[in-house]
Structure formats: C-alpha cells, structure tokens
Image: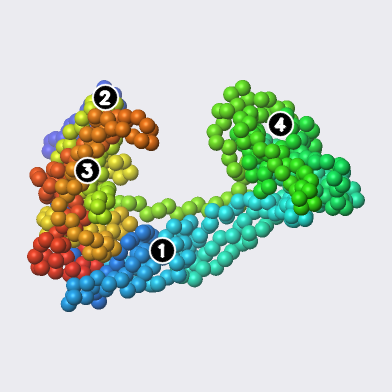
Amino acid sequence: MIKNLINKNKKLYFILLLLILIIVVIMSCKKVNILSPTHIPPPTDFTLSEDAIPGHVDVTPMPAKNGEVFGSFSKKFKYQGKWYILADYMYNYDPKSKTLNQIDKNIILQIDDNGNINVYAKNVDSSIFRRLKYNISVIENDKIIYEPNEYGTFSMSNISVDYESIINSIVYDSRYYTSSDLINWQTNGSAANIRYKMPAPNPNNPNESFQGGYGMGVSSFFQFKDYIYLMGLRETFFEQNPTGYRTVDLGPYTVSKNYYYRIHKSKDTSVGANWEKIDNTPWGARSGDYNFYNFHTVIDKDKIYVTGGVRCYYEYNPSISKWTISEESFKDDKRIWSTTDGVNWTLEPNSADAYGNPTMDRFNGLDRYLPNRIKTPEEPNWVKLDNGIYYKSDNTYSSLEIDGKEYYYPTIPYAEIDAAYNRGEEYFTVSETHLKGAGKNQFLAAREKPNEADSWKLITPIDYTDNLMVWQSGGEKVLLNINNKVIQLVDYYQIYLMLKSPPIQSYTPLLNYFREWAKKYREGYYDPMLDRVYISIPNAMYYGARADMVEAYMNNYKEYIMPMRLLRIILWSLDTDYCNFLFKCNFYFYISLH
C-alpha cells in the first residue's frame, strides 16, 4: 500500500516539474523574441573568395584530325543541342614540308557533347555563309530564322506617268528566311503587302482626291498623333497640261505644292473624300528633289518639324524644243517650322538647332506593321564552369606598318591616361599590371558580374613559352564549355599570315617611332593641314605609354610579351624543334583550371 502511494507521488512530482518547465519556457519566449530583427543571425556568405579564382591554367593540346586545321573564326551558336562554329578557311598541314596550305573556305564546324569537332559543311555558298555569320535573327528548336533589315518596314509603291512617279500605295515587306539544316533556305512572305491604299487619279473628276486628274508625287508619308500626313507634294506635268502639250507663251510654272493633306487614322485612305487639305504652308511651294528626297520631316511626341526641300518647276528649253524640269534648292535655308496640332505652324526661334540631323525616314511615326520576333541573343564572350567562376579570353592589341612590316603592340589603357590628364597630369607611368593585362589572347576569370570590365582577373599559363601556340587562339568566338572544361580553338589564319609576312628581328623601329611622336606632340610640330604648330599633351601621353610598354616588353618583361608578336620573331629565330612543336597541328586545346 505504502509502495503504491510512493509511486503515485513520483508521478505527481514528474507532472508538476514538467508543468513548471513549460511555464518557464513560455515566460522566456515572452521576454526574448528569438524571431525579432535584433536576434536574426547574419546571412551566410556564399561569395567565393579571391582564392577561388585560379592564378594558373594547365593547357592540354589536342591533335588535329587528318592534318586539318582552321582559321578566321567569326561566330559560335547553339542549334538543336550542338555547338556550331564558323571558320573562313580550312588548311592542311604537311609534316614533311612543314607547310600550311589552304584547301577549303566557308566552313561550318560542329562540336558534339564529347568535344569532337567535325566538318559539318565546307565551301558553303558565300551568301548563305554571310547570312549565318551576320544575320541570324532567331534560333528555334526546328529552324533558324533570318529577318532582313527590311522586314516589317514600309516603302512607297509608285506608278510612272511619263517619267513622273506618283503615289499608289504604302506597302510593307514581310519577307523572312528559314532553314532547318543551315544550308537550304526558304523564302517566306512578300515584299509588297499593301498597308495603305491611295485613291486613284481621275482625269474626269480631278477634284475627287489629292491625286487630281493625273496623280501626285509625295515626299513624306507619316503619322503624328491621330492623323496620317502627306507632305512635300509635286504634281505631274499633265495636271496643268492634260494633252501633254504646252505653248511657250504660257511660260514656266511650279509643280511643287504649297499645301498638304492629312487623314484621321481610323478612316479609309483609299477614299479621296476622307483626306483633309491644309492650304498655304508657311514654307511655300516645296517638295523633295527629283527622287523625292531633301524635304525633311521630323516628329517627336509633341511636334512635327519641317525644313529643306526644293521648288520644282518646268521651263521651256529652246535648244531641244522641250519643257524640262528644274529645281530651286533650299539647302541653305536653315529655317525650321513646327506644329503641335498638324495645322498651325510656328517658325522655330533657334531654327539652326531646333532638332538634330534631319532624318531620311519618309515614314516617321508609323509603327512596324509586323513586330520583330524576339531575337536570340548572341552567345556571351565568356563561359561558366560548375565551380561558379566565369572565364573568358581577351584579344586586345594594336598594329602599325613601318617600312612594309607589320608590328604588333599592346593596346594602352586609354581611360586611365585620360583620367590622369583630367587630373592635371602630363605624364603617365606604365605599371606591371598594365603590362600583364595588355597582351594578345590573355585568359581571365571572374567570380561574378561577367559583363563588368573591372571584375575580371588575369590568369597566366603555367609555362607561357612552352604553350605559346595555345595562345594563338580564336578568341571569344570559339570559347566553349564542354564537359565542364574550357575549349578554345587555335586560329591558324593568324599563323598563315605570319608565315607569309617578312620576319621582324627587332622592335627598335617601332619604339623609335613612338618616342619621336611623343616628343613631337609634347614640344609641338608644324602641321601643314592646320597651317600652325600643333601641341597635344594627351597624344604625347598616348605615344609615351606605347613606347614604355614596348620597351618594357623588350627589356624587362619578356614573360608577358604578346604571343602574336613573340611568335612572329620565334618562327625565324628558334631552332627547328620548336618550330616542329608549333606545327603539331593542335586543332584545339583543353584548359584545366585549378
């Protein structure tokens, strides 16, 4: 009995203690809110440290297949899960004669998921190759689309009346081209789809529309706010001479008009009665020239601006016994008129600068009738590996020809020099950082923001000299991520050019040239074109920096020397074994990053 009572008391004590603990926890939570802003722990920093960016790279050259190498790369794009690269030339390397011979051109290379590079097509028709090279608009799953610049744009469809062009309609171009295999292309759409139909001339009722009896030439067809306008009008010879004959005693007469027409955008443009005539333009009787140009209309959201044009008139030429058309030009008339309502005009007070350069677009304000498809963006000039780091190749360099020889030299840091000059400095000091970052085909890495120039860090090869050939790469156009490795093709076009060029044994002529011009710009020299002594401290700083960089490469920083320039020297100065190394036909190379 007593034992049972003790067991019951133990249970009561346990329950009591548990209740006390719960009460304490509740009271503690009231006193300290662990979710309050003052107690939220700082966010975990997932940013990669600077140490995560490699300082060196390992390069693994890959042999070419059948001695085939390529050069002058222009574009890379991905289609149906495979990479394609365009190369202008295909070469064959002969290991016996150590020669590089061009065998084909206009090459399409295909790269599979394993990094195998195959010739997809060669000697592609030049027009098709250019289309792939410059004009791909949209890449879809089953086709590639090319939209020419004319796609969706307007033009005037004119008809000719005794050598006079009169407006017939406004048409839009809907042509675009598609291909499923990159080689065979189909034409879609038409170049002459009627958007706005004009009323026809009517000799029996010339007051029926602006076309009169025999038609009207038009310089500008545009939309401003809710109205469409016809300006810069010029009638035909037949309008006042329906028989085609005019007696000499009637004298010369003007065919450019001092009025224009407009129509509300909701109305049918083919009905002449829908057009409203606005008389007595402040600029008088003006139109475009014989080709309907030079009559300038510019619009913004608030105003129409008009300037320029010519006055076209007929006068009798007795030497040929014919009436001939002449023009009075207003190109020197800088006046500009503007309107906010399309009817009431004002002469701009600062006419010469009222707006920028007058546009040659005769269809201002007309929205493209066919909206462009969303264009496929160009592939970026960098790749990103699984380690979260971006990599890219930099190919900045400059060249100068002296005595028939092409000298390559590093591009100077113009922005830094300009900043120094703006601070009042007259000299610029070239640092080792500038030297390391100015070579051709450098390799760089960034942890984030790959589109910002200051985020990239320079990487150097483990052995810059032994892997010299690697850095004659095709640049950003052939930089790929294949199986989480960076692949870059060797550009043999550059090698081909260097083999054809005369060897350069010394860069002293280039150095002397830069020093000479740095001195001229600093001290002043007579410029016959300006007929005065010309001094330019910024130019002196530019040339001085060029000279300092070239001299540093020659004397103290050979490990950073640009591969293109160094290779040009080495090819004719090093032993045969090294030249053989250069021509082991390294088709492309892997870069292992660590």
Nearer the observer: mark 3 or 2; the answer is 3
Would you say the residues marked 4 and 2 are in contact, meaning their CB atoms lie under 8 Å apart?
A: no
Label 4: state its secondary structure: loop
Whole-number angstrom distance, CA of label 4 to CA of label 2: 51 Å
Viewer-closest of 73 and 286: 286
Where is residue 272 drawn, in percent x and y? Answer: 82, 45
Query: Which residue type does callout 2 highlight?
Result: Arg
Would you say the residues marked 1 and 2 are in contact, meaning their CB atoms lie under 8 Å apart?
A: no
> Which residue lies at the image location 57% right of the left edge and 31% below the top edge?
355
Q: Could you classify mark 2 by the number of other residues whose Cα lies within 10 Å: few (under 14), some (14-19), or many (20 or more)?
A: few
- Disc 4 marks which residue? 283
Whole-number angstrom distance, CA of label 3 to CA of label 1: 49 Å
Q: Is residue 512 above or below residue 123?
A: above
Q: Could you classify mark 4 by the number of other residues whose Cα lies within 10 Å: few (under 14), some (14-19), or many (20 or more)?
A: some
Where is residue 170 drawn, in percent x and y? Answer: 69, 51
Task: Give the mark nearest the N terminus, 4 or 1.
Answer: 1
Query: Which residue type does callout 1 highlight?
Result: Tyr
Where is residue 358 drawn, in percent x and y? Answer: 58, 37
Whole-number angstrom distance, CA of label 4 to CA of label 1: 56 Å
Nearer the observer: mark 1 or 2; the answer is 2
Label 3: state its secondary structure: helix
Label 2: state its secondary structure: loop
The image quadrant where one finds the N terminus is top left
Task: Give the mark nearest the N terminus, 3 or 1.
Answer: 1
- Disc 2 marks which residue? 423
Q: Is residue 533 above or below residue 382?
A: above
Task: Give the mark nearest the N terminus, 4 or 3.
Answer: 4
- Disc 1 marks which residue? 79
Query: Which residue type does callout 3 highlight?
Result: Tyr
